[in-house]
């Protein structure tokens, strides 16, 4: 049997990134933390940590962390059943989510439920194509991801599709893509069609992060352009990303929930109305009988039904 005090030490060392900070969180000495990790490594016969800065788990360490997180969730559910969600011992639910969902439909879906149950929400924000790794590593009990195929020991449920529109301010579009001959007779969605590779090569784009390949796929699919053939600003914040586009710093791909209200107000225009990118989103979670993951999925699915495209 594994000592759960030792597993907890492993989890805290990884989450805090080192032994010293873990000791402060656990209210024990650093040598005591080291001893617990050493006992655990001796028990499984393998190294569990890479002593880097910050400290990270080995593949075996990640498997133990996943096991520990699952047991924590089940114990929290048992305690909730016995204590009726005692607010003195709130359950923490860790979820990995992409920034665009977090900035739009995600929190409204969960706010009421977490308030009713006195649960604590711990979010890990990453690109939607990477969030499933956080689930696999045991850092989250569920994730919003673009990965449809369920990972081992997990279930995958379709939530809906986020549609991304290529947008810019009218001023930016006029500067880089030229004005049509009669702007008065054209609607916003008809402006600046016929964009060329040469124009896109000179117009700076706004990209969320180096992990985010959506813009790269967009230019490859519709304009046959390869990385390095355009300029880009990299702004890894949903709010600042959109603000940069609104300030005419560049053009970019914005989810329909954020883009359409701004287009309706005339703040942004859609540059390529016939050329959009669709990103299907799925909810993946562990196959354990925990009411938290079940209720979270129900809440997400209900909100996604009204906010995401169901295609």
Image (cartoon, grey):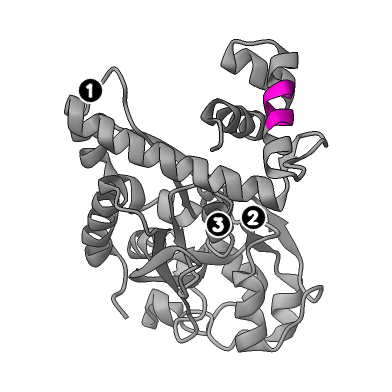
What is the span of residues highlighted in magenta in the rendered image?
Answer: 34-39
Residue 34 is left or right of residue 241, and the answer is right
Which quadrant is the C terminus positioned in? bottom left
For the residues carrying marks 2 and 3, which lies nearer the camera in this image?
Answer: 3
- The reply to whether callout 1 and callout 3 are in contact (CB within 8 Å) is no
For the residues carrying marks 1 and 2, which lies nearer the camera in this image?
Answer: 1
Report how far apart the C-alphas of labels 1 and 3 lie in the structure: 29 Å
Quadrant housing residue 6: top right
Q: Residue at x 31, y 67 (%)?
A: 308
Chief secondary structure of the magenta portion: helix
Of marks 2 and 3, which one's residue comes earlier in the chain?
3
Q: Which residue is mark 3?
A: 136
286 up-or-down from 218: above or below? above
Instruction: Classify mark 2: helix, strand or loop.
Output: loop
Estimate how packed mark 1 is, as few (under 14), some (14 to 19) or many (20 or more) residues with alpha carbons within 10 Å: some
Q: Which residue is mark 2?
A: 249
Of marks 1 and 2, which one's residue comes earlier in the chain?
1
Report how far apart the C-alphas of labels 2 and 3 lie in the structure: 37 Å
Report how far apart the C-alphas of labels 1 and 2 lie in the structure: 49 Å
Q: Which residue is mark 1?
A: 86
Give residue 47's position: percent from left, percent from top: 77, 43
Estimate how packed mark 2 is, as few (under 14), some (14 to 19) or many (20 or more) residues with alpha carbons within 10 Å: many
């Amino acid at each position: 049997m594994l000592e759960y005090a030792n597993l907890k030490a492993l989890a805290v060392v990884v989450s805090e990134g080192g032994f010293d900070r873990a000791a402060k969180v656990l209210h024990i000495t650093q040598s005591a933390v080291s001893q617990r990790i050493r006992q655990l490594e001796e028990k499984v016969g393998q190294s569990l940590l890479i002593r880097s800065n910050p400290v990270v788990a080995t593949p075996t360490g990640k498997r133990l962390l996943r096991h520990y997180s699952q047991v924590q969730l089940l114990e929290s559910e048992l305690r909730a059943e016995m204590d009726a969600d005692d607010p003195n011992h709130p359950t923490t639910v860790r979820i990995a989510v992409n920034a665009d969902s977090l900035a739009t439909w995600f929190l409204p879906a969960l706010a009421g439920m977490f308030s009713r149950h006195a649960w604590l929400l711990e979010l890990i924000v990453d690109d939607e194509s990477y969030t499933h790794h956080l689930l696999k590593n045991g850092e989250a009990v569920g994730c919003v991801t673009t990965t449809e195929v369920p990972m081992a020991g997990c279930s995958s449920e379709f939530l809906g599709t986020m549609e991304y529109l290529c947008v810019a301010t009218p001023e930016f579009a006029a500067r880089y893509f030229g004005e049509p001959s009669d702007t008065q007779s054209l609607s916003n969605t008809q402006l600046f069609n016929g964009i060329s590779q040469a124009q896109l090569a000179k117009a700076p784009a706004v990209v969320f992060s180096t992990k985010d390949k959506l813009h790269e796929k967009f230019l490859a699919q519709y304009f046959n352009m390869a990385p390095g053939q355009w300029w880009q600003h990299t702004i890894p914040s949903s709010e600042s990303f959109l603000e940069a586009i609104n300030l005419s710093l560049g053009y970019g791909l914005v989810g329909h929930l954020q883009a359409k209200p701004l287009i309706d107000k005339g703040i942004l225009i859609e540059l390529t109305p016939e050329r959009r990118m669709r990103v299907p989103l799925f909810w993946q979670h562990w196959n354990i009988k925990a009411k938290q993951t079940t209720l979270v999925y129900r809440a997400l699915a209900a909100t996604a039904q009204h906010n995401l495209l169901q295609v």
